[in-house]
Amino acid sequence: MATHTDKLAIEGGAPVRTQPLPYGRQWLDDADVDAVVAVLRSDWLTTGPQVAEFEAAFAAAVGAPHAVAVSSGTAALHAAMYAAGVGPGDEVIVPALTFAASANCAVYQGATPVFADVSPGTLLLAPTEVERLLTPRTRAVVSVDYAGQPCEYDRLRTIARDRGICLVADACHALGGRYREEPVGTLADLTAFSLHPVKHITTGEGGVVTTADPALATRMRTFRNHGITADHARRAAQNSWFYEMVDLGYNYRLTDFQCALGLSQLRKLPGWVARRRALARRYDGALAELPGVRPLAVRPEVEHAYHLYVIELDSEVLSASRADVFAALRAEGIAVNVHYIPVYWHPFYRDRFGMTPGLCPVTEEAYARMLSLPMYAGMSDADADSVVEAVDKVVHHYAR
Ligand SMILES: *Cc1c(COP(=O)(O)O)cnc(C)c1O
């Protein structure tokens, strides 16, 4: 056990861990591998029986009437924008503190993203900001369930309903979360999930959109298949060559062997979400004792899915910058990360839309203070304790 007086690894001391701990990673077992191999030996590599089976299981897991599987979380967001009817001239309100894909999906459809600030403490899309930014051109709002905590859906749904706009949840962090007992996946008109390896369950690359509206689900199934209405299986069943391309779509299909992996992973989801919550409680308890670090606020009406465990550093208490703490923890063998650089700071948004720093002050202040600690279901209690040990060592070193 390192003590506060031990020399930091970044200054030549012994690191807390010799085997570095990543911030997130997948967990695959023999059942997952067997499920994929069985499909690789079958007749269907793509658009076969596993797709519909995975969609049905995913829909059931989140309590949504429909789930549409696509090739990535980004494709899921794009399909949701398409289904929502977002197009040129429209505005889409997006929080500034998110992964670029949450905003890019609006740009794909020719719309303009309008960046909204987040609430201090939770760093979730602020409903008052959404109200302030509404215009007659607003077509949709993207609510990002940042870190895995569902947004304030009571207020966001009221705003969307009153104004007749579409609420699209970017729930890439929040599979397995709940808001007032209702599962993520049923809280917005459309909900996008990612199946990337750092997310709750994985298919390598992959994504899903859930909705209660059968017409929107049908639109997205056409969209992911070039805009073609009759699928391959139906054509085969009807013994016909006929199909029609009714709109411009994409090839955003997810393969059968990926869906087989998704089905196998989905069985483990409840246990994995519970494990993430247990790790978060362990962090909460231990970090409360340390100077200059504060976990994000969690509202009582949510069940957090903990894709990320984010802390904010207090510059009044610590003499080091976030960059210094980041480098010191990395040297201790803890692969901390930062989620995210404000989206409108990226050159694309700066140059294309003329966006400038200062647009969303809460986001920018939070960005300057934040660190994501390792968080994934495969972490042991000892792994989590080594993170706390490293944070303890580093913040005591830098405490004023
Ligand atoms: C991961 C993620 C995405 C994109 O998902 P991909 O599957 O990598 O395309 C979008 N939004 C958020 C908030 C994410 O974390």
Image (cartoon, rainbow, N blue to C red):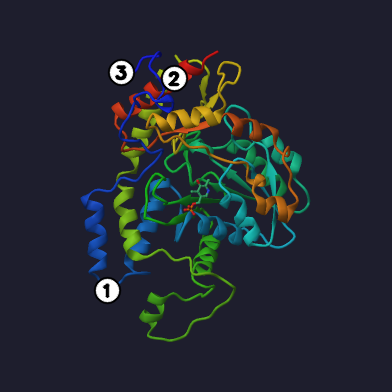
Element type at mark 2: helix
For residue 121, above or below residue 350: above
Please state the horizontal and vertical placement of residue 342, each as a whole percent of the image: 63, 41
User: For the point 37% across and 63% down, which residue is it?
Assistant: 51
Is 214 in front, or is 90? 90
- Quadrant in which the C terminus appears: top right
Dot in front, 3 or 1: 3
Separation of marks 3 and 1 at Cα, in angstroms:
55 Å
Q: N-terminal of the two: label 3 or label 1?
A: 3
Q: Which mark is residue 43?
A: 1
Badge 2 density bin: few <14, some 14–19, many ≥20, Cα 10 Å: some
Please state the horizontal and vertical placement of residue 48, each as a whole percent of the image: 34, 69
Judge left or right: residue 53 versus residue 82: left
User: For the point 55% across and 70% down, which residue is it?
Assistant: 249
What amino acid type should be assigned to the residue bearing mark 2?
Leu
For residue 29, above or below residue 358: below
What amino acid type should be assigned to the residue bearing mark 3?
Met
Judge left or right: residue 182 versus residue 97: left
**Mark 2–mark 1 contact, CB under 8 Å?**
no
Residue where numbered disc 3 is placed = 1
Residue where numbered disc 2 is placed = 287
What amino acid type should be assigned to the residue bearing mark 1?
Asp
Judge left or right: residue 85 versus residue 40: right
